[in-house]
């Protein structure tokens, strides 16, 4: 459970998904979509991001293997909270207040692109032109830790090496502006969510 939750939290930040939940903000530049990912490095596997209302609703499902151990996780952003759980251990999950809301407003007055650049600048990464990924022109943010490609606010690629830790996540399919089933944004009723401390 702990490995699934930590992976989910990491992905929330790397995807710049599940961002602000106030109507003045639009995390993504497209209304809805389904993005499929492949992961390699210390963790291998696949993931799928579902979102609607310009990212105001989002859910991320991951299935990965690390050191021979399989794990699955869901991360759902709803209202001012993020909920994380392992569907293979459905009795309990974690929830936390979404810290990105206040961070975005304070750092960039609601400008998602500026917030993203400011966030990565703290990791000594800077905006460095554009690059194509799956035919989409993406903003490149790179530095010593690695490289990230962002398209319409959506993470298309992240490649990081920090010490011995290696992480590579890349979009393998993009379905923009397609209907997304509302079931992905509904919390399971059988799970008790415990509060996590805020970052």
Image (cartoon, rainbow, N blue to C red):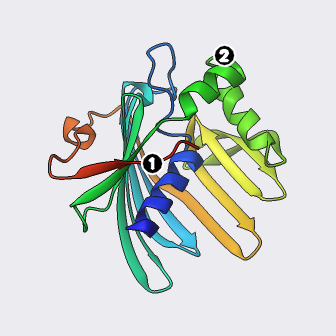
Residues packed near mark 2 inside 10 Å, few (<14), some (14 to 19) or many (20 plus): few
136 and 77: which is toward the camera: 77
Residue 13 percent across, percent down from the top left: 57, 46
- Please tell me whether mark 1 sits on a helix, a strand or a loop: loop
Given this view, does label 2 or label 1 mark the residue nearer the observer?
1
Residue at x 50% of width, y 53% of height: 9
Tell me where residue 121 sits by quadrant. top right
Is residue 133 left or right of 33 when viewed as pictured? right
Residue 72 vertical placement versus 79 (above, below): below
Locate the C terminus and report the quarter of the image it occupies: top right
At 66% across and 16% down in the image, what residue appears? Answer: 109
| Residue 178: x %, y % from top left | 31, 34
Residue 40 in the image, given as x and y percentages of width and height: 55, 71
The outermost residue toward the bottom is: 68
Which class describes the residues within 10 Å of circle 1: few (<14), some (14-19), or many (20+)? Answer: few
| Front position in the image: 125 or 98 | 98
Q: Residue 183, relative to residue 134: is it above or below?
A: above
The residue closer to the viewer here, 67 or 84, is 84
* Image position, residue 95 (x, y; %): 38, 45
Name the residue: 56% across, 60% down: 169
Q: Which residue is mark 2?
A: 109
* Front in this rendered view, residue 188 or 15: 188
For the residues marked 2 and 1, what is the alpha-carbon distance in whole angstroms?
A: 26 Å
Badge 2 marks a residue whose secondary structure is: loop
């Amino acid at each position: 459970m702990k490995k699934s939750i930590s992976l989910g939290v990491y992905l929330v930040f790397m995807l710049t998904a599940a961002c602000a939940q106030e109507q003045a903000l639009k995390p993504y530049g497209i209304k809805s979509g389904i993005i499929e990912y492949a992961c390699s490095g210390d963790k291998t596997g696949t993931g799928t991001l579902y979102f609607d209302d310009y990212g105001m609703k989002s859910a991320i499902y991951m299935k990965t293997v690390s050191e021979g151990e399989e794990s699955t996780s869901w991360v759902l952003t709803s209202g001012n909270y993020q909920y994380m759980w392992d569907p293979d251990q459905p009795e309990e999950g974690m929830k936390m207040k979404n810290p990105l809301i206040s961070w975005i407003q304070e750092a960039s007055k609601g400008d998602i692109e500026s917030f993203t650049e400011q966030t990565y600048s703290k990791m000594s990464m800077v905006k460095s032109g554009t690059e194509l990924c799956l035919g989409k022109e993406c903003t490149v943010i790179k530095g010593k830790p690695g490289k990230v490609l962002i398209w319409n606010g959506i993470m298309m690629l992240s490649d990081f090496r920090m010490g011995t830790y290696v992480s590579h996540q890349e979009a393998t399919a993009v379905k923009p502006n397609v209907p997304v089933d509302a079931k992905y944004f509904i919390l399971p009723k059988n799970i008790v969510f415990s509060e996590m401390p805020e970052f």
